[in-house]
Image: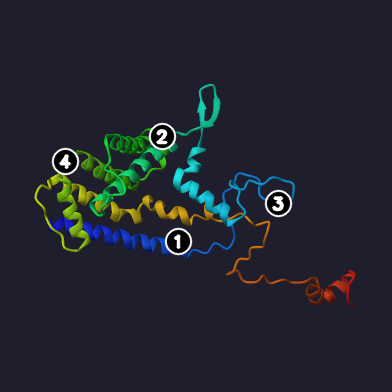
Amino acid sequence: MVAAALIAYLGFAVFVAGMVWRVVAWARVPVPFPIALTCGQQKSLAGIRAAWLENPWTRAGAGCRTALEALVFRSLLRNSRAQLLPGPRFVYRGDRSLWAGALLFHGCLLWVLVGHLRFFLEPAPLGPANKFVDAGLLAGLAFLFLRRVLDPRLRYVTLAADYLPLALLAAVAGSGVLMKTDVAAVKRFALGLVAFHPVAPAGLGALFYIHVIAASALAASIPFTKLAHMAGIFFSPTRNLPNDSRARRHINPWLEPARVHTYAEWEDEFRDKMRAAGLPLERE
């Protein structure tokens, strides 16, 4: 029990410190001009309809675009796939499978995370996960894993480190689904961790401690893996910046002023040679 509590504290501490470090590093990166990824008409001349959401020129529009990206994965909804078929025949079509799988997985994961608050709050904001939520979570996780294995192009760009979050998520979800334990005992253990006075109630089996250790390892790995996108999406300049480059001039704040060599200075420098060559001079 003591080891599980120490691992839980360590995992939470690494998660908080790592995410603060990542967020501060992202926030300190200067972005002096908008580099928004747009696919709609930019606001320009009167009478030309602009795309307020696709190509926002206000902070409100950029905020709405970022919110839709974070909540419903808007860019994945418009995902496309190009494929060269025998013939040869080039096929370009929409592919919404990743959007559906990601939405299923993240929705079920959110339900599970909010449901776990019943171990810390009274009354709980949401009931425990049911069989449908567990099945959806495992199905979404299996989809995200199989697409990396079965898609040749995606498998080619996948690193070994990309499988670590999936493995840890599978360990947490699998142990949680298989675990049958006393909810009251788990709540006493959780409240003991929060109060920095961990206890070891009776009735907590090995699967529970495996679940705690796997969840702690997952939390500690988040700042150093692609799972950090949960915070990084809000710092993406391609999403959160309004595209107002035509409305106002953006000046790079750290760029040194350009050294300009005017024609008058150039003429003063080569005056004798120009006069000898018979070239006209603006000033004699």
Q: Tell me which label, 3 or 1, sits earlier in the chain.
A: 1
Between circles 1 and 4, the one closer to the viewer is 4
Q: Tell me which label, 4 or 3, sits earlier in the chain.
A: 3
Amino acid type, mark 3: Ser
Q: Give the distance between the C-alpha atoms of the residues marked 3 and 1, in whole angstroms.
A: 31 Å
**218 with respect to 182 (left or right):** right
Tell me, for residue 44, which label it has, or none.
3
Specify the quadrant of the image occupied by residue 110. Answer: top left
Q: Residues within 10 Å of mark 1 (few under 14, many from 20)?
A: some
Q: Is residue 96 above or below residue 43?
A: above
Q: Tell me which label, 1 or 2, sits earlier in the chain.
A: 1
Amino acid type, mark 4: Lys
Q: Residues within 10 Å of mark 3 (few under 14, many from 20)?
A: few
Q: Which residue is found at the position 56% from the left and 56% from the top?
A: 241
Residue 105: % across, % down? 36, 40
Callout 3: helix, strand or loop? loop
Between circles 2 and 4, the one closer to the viewer is 4
Q: Which residue is found at the position 23% from the left and 40% from the top?
A: 174
Between circles 4 and 3, the one closer to the viewer is 4
**Which residue is disc 4 drawn over?**
180
Callout 2: helix, strand or loop? helix
* Colour pattern: rainbow
Callout 1: helix, strand or loop? helix
Q: Give the distance between the C-alpha atoms of the residues marked 1 and 4, in whole angstroms.
A: 42 Å
